């Protein structure tokens, strides 16, 4: 079965500093990888996803992520964070399961991002 | 454009009471529908998914059930709530059958069982 690990529960970054959120996955085949962001009390918004091709993926709000097969990682980065980036970030893997790929995502436990002024 | 609605937004229920949470999607046909639960410190857990009317797959055996009476309606139910059912319930939809298809999430329902 697939799994996703986000090793950092909380990360604190100063406004304007760079950011990297870590994500490692476990899956036997080529994974489909997603990053979502959740503001307090809200649903999830897709930041970006990887499913094939270029391993560096650009997303919304200035985020990017790099798929590294050799490290089973899909880390999220942003060169300069803004106070509005404070939120919960989730990495997820989609697979070609019994539902033909329609059978849901497996999420990590999330990383809570705190922005210091 | 597509939109997804969930209600109620917030719910406080006593232990042993029934539950019904509703999710509807507009602007698309034959979507895949999902129920996730988010408990504190535990990320999102897939509860049920459906690829069509009357087709429900359960990921985790538990006190909850799901139904899909119409193409764009997904209902999460319980006959008797437990304290452990408290959490944030998210509905999502997607189209297609590929693992790379994006899932779009609703605003969620905060359930507190007392």
Image (cartoon, rainbow, N blue to C red):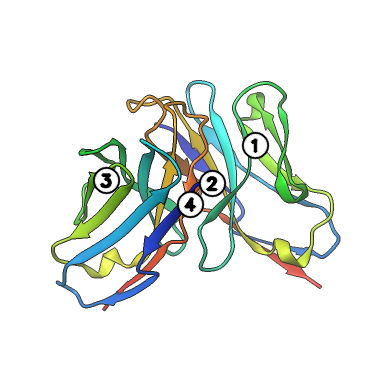
Same chain check for tags 2 and 4: yes
The residue to which callout 4 is attached is B3
Decide: few, some or many residues near mark 4? Use Cα within 10 Å; few <14, some 14-19, many ≥20: few
Q: Position of residue A53 (x, y in %)?
A: 68, 21
Pointer 4 indicates a residue of which chain? Answer: B
Look at the image and tell me whether residue B5 can be seen: yes
- The CA distance from mark 3 to mark 4 is 27 Å
Chain ID of residue with mark 2: B
Q: Give the CA separation, mark 3 to mark 2.
A: 32 Å
* Residue B19 % position (x, y): 21, 65
Residue B38 visible in the displayed image: no
Cα separation between marks 2 and 4? 7 Å
- Dot 2 crowding, Cα within 10 Å, few <14, some 14–19, many 20+: few
Give the Cα separation between the discs numbered 1 and 2: 30 Å
What residue is pinned by disc 1?
A: A74
- Depth order, front residue of B47/A27: B47
Residue at 39% across / 60% down in the picture? B6
Can you identify the residue that label 3 sits on? B60
User: Disc 4 versus disc 1: distance between alpha carbons?
Assistant: 29 Å
């Amino acid at each position: 079965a697939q799994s996703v690990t986000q090793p950092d529960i909380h990360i604190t970054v100063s406004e304007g500093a760079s950011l990297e959120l870590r994500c490692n996955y476990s899956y036997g085949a080529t994974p489909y990888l997603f990053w979502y962001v959740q503001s307090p009390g809200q649903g999830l918004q897709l930041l970006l996803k990887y499913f094939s091709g270029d391993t560096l993926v650009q997303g919304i709000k200035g985020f990017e992520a790099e798929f590294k097969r050799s490290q089973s990682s899909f880390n999220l980065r942003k060169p300069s964070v803004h106070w509005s980036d404070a939120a919960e970030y989730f990495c997820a893997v989609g697979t070609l399961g019994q539902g033909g790929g329609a059978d849901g995502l497996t999420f990590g436990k999330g990383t809570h991002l705190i922005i210091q002024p | 454009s597509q939109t997804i609605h969930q209600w109620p937004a917030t719910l406080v229920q006593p232990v042993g009471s029934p539950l019904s949470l509703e999710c509807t999607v507009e602007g698309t046909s034959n979507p895949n529908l999902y129920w996730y639960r988010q408990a504190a410190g535990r990320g999102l857990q897939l509860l049920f998914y459906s690829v069509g009317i009357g087709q429900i797959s359960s990921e985790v055996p538990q006190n909850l059930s799901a139904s899909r009476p119409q193409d764009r309606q997904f209902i999460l139910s319980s006959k008797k709530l437990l304290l452990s059912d408290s959490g944030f319930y998210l509905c999502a939809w997607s189209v297609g059958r590929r693992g790379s298809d994006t899932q779009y999430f609703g605003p969620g329902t905060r359930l507190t069982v007392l």
